[in-house]
Image (spheres, rainbow, N blue to C red):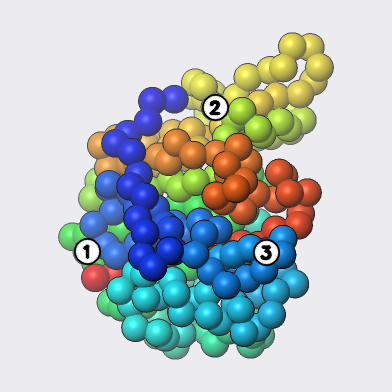
């Protein structure tokens, strides 16, 4: 797969995050650098359920808000369950850390200015979307199950309800596991074939006659966004594999589950 103009690495008081050239709104893809968590969660863990202390997690969020130039506030995020529910959110959907989730959804979209949208990953693909003309943004969690179940189509439809137009939508496909490290059984490429209608290109290849396949979820997402009407020049793709770079990013596979969570964040501005 050919990558677009590279993502930029940003640093603020030791907190490192990535930005995409196609997203004009305030946004960032966090790494595992720049927080206060310790041990196997060293150091920027944003997951509430990874075994970290509440004090550490709250401080990590405060540092992310400061690095992105946002006031400390309640963000908007959901319980992610690898399905295709995408929710239109408003200020009423802000959530205080360590309180019960009101609903499950793997994508959230909004046109409310100043409302930070978060999605969390540790190998799955984070996709940030925005229509700068309509003032609409979205944060979408694309694991393989939600990807092949067509969560991106649902996300674009929800954005359209808010006034977005596909030809104006810009996308950033963030750091996640890449083909080099993502081996699957046949069910995943078969589902990709069904999703893309056979237009799979370099989205996977067979590992000899083993019955295993190496899968590129980023390319799958990129191709689906093109099918949904986005312009090629409006899509940027991170060239970093979270598994290969598990010193920089949280990777569930590389750490065998002993890991924190990173976030993709976007704010309509």
Instruction: Between label 2 and label 1, give the one nearer the viewer.
Output: 2
Q: Nearer the viewer, residue 27 or 31?
A: 31
**Image quadrant containing the C terminus:** bottom left
Q: Residue furthest left?
A: 133
Q: Identify the disc placed on residue 134.
A: 1
**Residue on which the image places disc 2:** 203
Q: Which badge, 3 or 2, is on the more N-terminal residue?
A: 3
Give the image location of residue 168, x and y in percent: 23, 50
Assess disc 2: are there few (<14), some (14-19) or many (≥20) residues with their C-alpha within 10 Å of its C-alpha.
Answer: many
In the image, residue 178 sits, relative to residue 151, either above or below, namely above
Give the image location of residue 179, x and y in percent: 59, 30
Q: CB of mark 1 within 8 Å of CB of mark 3? A: no
Separation of disc 2 and disc 1 at Cα? 31 Å
Give the image location of residue 101, x and y in percent: 63, 81
Separation of disc 1 and disc 3 at Cα? 39 Å
Q: Nearer the viewer, residue 190 or 172?
A: 172
Q: Residue furthest top?
A: 208
Give the image location of residue 72, x and y in percent: 40, 84
* Visible residue check, residue 159: no
Instruction: Between label 3 and label 2, give the one nearer the viewer.
Output: 3
In the image, residue 196 sits, relative to residue 99, either above or below, namely above
Image quadrant of residue 211?
top right
Q: Which badge, 2 or 1, is on the more N-terminal residue?
A: 1
Residue at horizontal 48 percent and vertical 33 percent from the top: 219
Find numbered disc 1 in the image and state the secondary structure of the residue it sits on.
loop
In the image, residue 138 sits, relative to residue 22, either above or below, namely below
Q: Identify the disc placed on residue 41.
A: 3
Find numbered disc 2 in the image and state the secondary structure of the residue it sits on.
loop
Q: CB of mark 2 within 8 Å of CB of mark 1? A: no
């Amino acid at each position: 797969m050919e990558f677009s103009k590279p993502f930029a690495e940003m640093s603020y008081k030791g907190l490192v995050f990535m930005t995409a050239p196609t997203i004009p709104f305030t946004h960032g893809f966090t790494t595992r650098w720049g927080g206060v968590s310790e041990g196997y969660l060293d150091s920027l863990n944003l997951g509430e359920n990874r075994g970290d202390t509440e004090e550490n997690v709250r401080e990590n969020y405060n540092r992310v808000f400061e690095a992105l130039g946002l006031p400390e506030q309640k963000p908007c995020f959901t319980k992610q369950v690898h399905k295709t529910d995408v929710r239109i959110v408003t200020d009423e959907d802000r959530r205080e850390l360590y309180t019960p989730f009101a609903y499950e959804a793997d994508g959230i979209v909004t046109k409310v200015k100043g409302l930070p949208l978060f999605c969390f990953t540790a190998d799955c693909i984070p996709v940030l979307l925005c229509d700068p003309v309509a003032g609409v943004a979205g944060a979408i969690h694309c694991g393989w199950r939600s990807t092949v179940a067509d969560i991106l189509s649902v996300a674009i439809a929800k954005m359209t309800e808010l006034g977005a137009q596909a030809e104006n939508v810009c996308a950033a496909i963030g750091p996640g596991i890449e083909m080099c490290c993502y081996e699957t059984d046949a069910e995943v490429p078969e589902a990709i074939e069904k999703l893309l209608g056979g237009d799979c290109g370099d989205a996977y290849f067979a590992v000899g006659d083993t019955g295993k396949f190496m899968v590129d979820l980023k390319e799958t997402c990129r191709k689906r966004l093109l099918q949904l009407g986005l312009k090629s020049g409006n899509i940027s793709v991170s060239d970093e594999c979270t598994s290969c770079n598990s010193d920089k990013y949280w990777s569930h596979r590389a750490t065998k589950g002993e890991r924190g969570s990173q976030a993709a964040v976007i704010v309509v501005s």
